[in-house]
Image (spheres, rainbow, N blue to C red):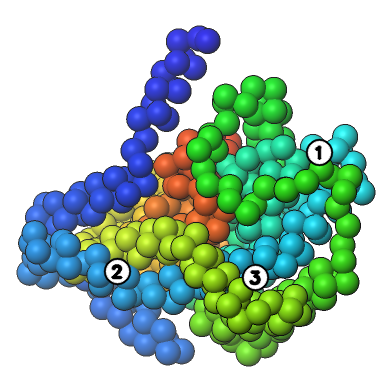
Amino acid sequence: MTKSNVKASSFFNRIPHAITMLFGIIVLVTMLTYIIPAGTYERVLVDGRSTVVPNSYRVIPSTPIGFLNMFKAIPLGFKEAVEIIFIVLAGGIMFGFMEQSRAVENAVGTIVRRLGLKRKNLIIIITTFVYGLLGVAVGYENNIAMVPIAAVLSLALGGDLILAAGISVGAMTIGFGLSPINPYTVGTGHKIAELPMFSGAFLRSVLCFAGLGIMAYYNVRYFKKITSNPEKSLGKGLDMTKLALSKPIQEYRLSRKNWLVIGIFSAGLLIILYGVFNLNWYINELSAVFLIIALLCGLASRMSATTMSETTLKAVALAAPGAFMVGFATSIKVLMEMGNIGDTISHQLSTLLQGLPLYASAVCMSASQSVINFFIPSGSGQALATLPVMLPLGESLGLTRQITILAFQIGDGLSNLVNPTLGGLIAMLSMCRVPIDRWIRFIFPVLLSVLCVAFLGLIVAVATNYS
């Protein structure tokens, strides 16, 4: 092993446990409230949503967070994240019932048997792009129910849970983050900028496809590495209870009950898609549908009331650590609001962009959005908070509005791959039982590679006056 490899390995090995990492961030944000001045932008309601007024930033009296309030922010974080916490539990319950019926295991085993184990790499590539397209077209948290299926598939192929997260969470995050039809970032941005909705889709589509290609390449490379040397697996010691296949591939078949359960699950997904796109459904409605699917799967499998009750509690026990992490991470957002330093950070970053060369300003604008995303993890929320400031600034620097929105989309979307304050990321990682510290060790090279390609696309956009 070379010196550089040793250094890189030791760096990633020093990444602390997820709980330790998040608590360290909580302490850091608390300390920052004593260092960074409190400030705020004026906000107005536009179509029922709070939007920043450009050039309205003002300093307000500091509101440093005391020792008691630092810990008080933790239960407040759980209170604010209760919807995402419950969808983790509801998704876990639904998958618990599907697992108890053996429908998922038998379906994955049958698919692998029919495609053949000689085509493992092709299966990984195809499923990476399928999950990526789900992120592009369906959304982010809306796909949480699909994550455990990748876990079963990865283990069936001889991979691990880290690979499962790469196939599902990594692909969906990149697909959603760079989606040309992302309603939360691109859609909101175009509305604020008064541009045609989802205009400039060609360049975004190219970047999205390239990002998913890089993700698929890294997934296959990681799979080859751990199959040739299992000791290099980042998934060692992770809980694989009821995810691994229980018998040889050749023995897998789908029964009528399995087909019925799969049919119920598929119908539920179609109902969710209809509700999301036509009835403005969001997390609570999805949780309700997950619970209905779980109940119907239990009835279709002819489970007794006692079996259904025990299955529910076992599923909740497995999902509970991930649900806890969602609430714990959200407490960071609560601390930012208590300390009133989020707007100050946004203002200072926008000020730093002034005077930079044209190409550097576009890339740095995107990088600044990545920093802001840590404090405002909501895509639409970040758009409403920063784009009214960034759009006029971009025009003063010589950047078109389309370029500013692309820079915002790249900075927001790709930093979601490693954002510990993003509840959706923590929730989906929890569905395949991967702690964020191990996830960062796996996904960080992917993030750097995709960022390089995306920044190159941003430079091309500046060179061609993308509009």
Query: Helix or strand or loop: what does disc 2 sit on?
Result: helix
Q: Earlier in the sequence, mark 2 or mark 3?
A: 2
Q: Which quadrant would the C terminus be assigned to in this image?
A: bottom right
Q: How far apart, in angstroms, are the residues tagged by discs 2 and 3?
A: 29 Å
Q: How far apart, in angstroms, are the residues tagged by discs 1 and 2?
A: 41 Å
Q: Position of residue 80 (x, y in %)?
A: 33, 75
As drawn, the residue found furthest toward the right would be 114
Q: Position of residue 66 (x, y in %)?
A: 7, 62
Tell me where residue 214 sits by quadrant. Answer: top right
3 and 1 marks in contact (CB < 8 Å): no
**Is residue 22 something that shows in the picture?**
yes
As drawn, the residue found furthest toward the top would be 2
Question: Residue 291 versus residue 177: which sits nearer the camera?
Answer: 291
Amino acid marked by disc 2: Gly
Question: Residue 243 versus residue 150: which sits nearer the camera?
Answer: 243
Q: Height in image: 73 above or below 356?
A: below
Q: Which residue is mark 3?
A: 97
Q: Residue at horizontal 50%, vertical 38%?
A: 237
Q: Residue at horizontal 19%, vertical 51%?
A: 27
Q: Which residue is mark 1?
A: 120
Amino acid marked by disc 3: Phe
Q: Earlier in the sequence, mark 3 or mark 1?
A: 3
Q: Position of residue 229 (x, y in %)?
A: 64, 22
Q: Position of residue 441 (x, y in %)?
A: 48, 36
Q: Residues within 10 Å of mark 1 (few under 14, many from 20)?
A: many
Q: Which residue is mark 2?
A: 77
Amino acid marked by disc 1: Lys
Specify whether 405 is left or right of 116: left
Q: Residue at horizontal 64%, vertical 70%?
A: 97
Query: Helix or strand or loop: what does disc 1 sit on?
Result: helix
Q: Residue at horizontal 73%, vertical 48%?
A: 246
